[in-house]
Amino acid sequence: MIKKIDIQQIDHVEFITYDNPGWGIIIFLKYLLSIERIIVRRNSISDSDFLIQVIDGNRLETKGSSTNLLELFIYILDFFKIPLNILDEELISLIVWFQKWYTNECDEYWEHLYGIKGEMNEKGDVFIQIDLDETIWGDEYFKPVLKCEKIDTKFIIKCKFSELVDNLIIFKNWIKSLQD
């Protein structure tokens, strides 16, 4: 197994939501992890509460239900032997808020057609699109800030990985300002 993650080892990362509903983080590495598909971990409590981590070729796929986003990050950190203390209180709070926001938007319709997707390339450039179609946020105005903008009903973040938390906080604060 890999002892340590290094940005040079990553080809790219994809972040997606599934319509079951759930999350997926797929890390593509520049080298082969395994010739066979291997289930690293599986925790299936029910169809709506699951976590699974799979090695497939040069990919590490970590997937979970809508309420397990934080656990996905913990699985990934554990896989790469990265200390969990990099998840500071502010980051944990943001992940938990994002997980709750997404879960609240899932209404057995929205998650089948829309959702969240993102990617990070080997240079650390991040692109995230949060599709706000068919939500109460879709028609709301957002003034572009930092690396965030809203195009039609899509909230877009284009930034460096090191700027991602700050830009996700902007999304969170915008949503919270509309709730007040």
Image (cartoon, rainbow, N blue to C red):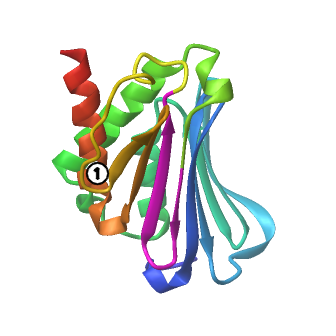
Front one among 95 and 165: 165
Q: Is residue 50 visible?
A: no
Q: Quadrant of residue 146?
A: bottom left
- The reply to whether the magenta stretch includes residue 53 is no
Q: Is residue 38 above or below residue 142?
A: below
Disc 1 crowd, CA 10 A, few/some/many (<14, 14-19, 20+): many
Position of 73 with respect to 172 (left or right) is right
Which stretch appears magenta?
118-132
Where in the figure is residue 172, as x and y percent of width and height?
27, 35
Q: Is residue 34 visible?
A: yes
Looking at the rendered structure, the kind of residue marked 1 is Asn
Position of 91 with respect to 130 (left or right) is left
- The reply to whether the magenta stretch includes residue 120 is yes
Disc 1 marks which residue? 167
Residue shown at the point (30%, 32%) measured from the top left: 97
**Mark 1 element type:** helix
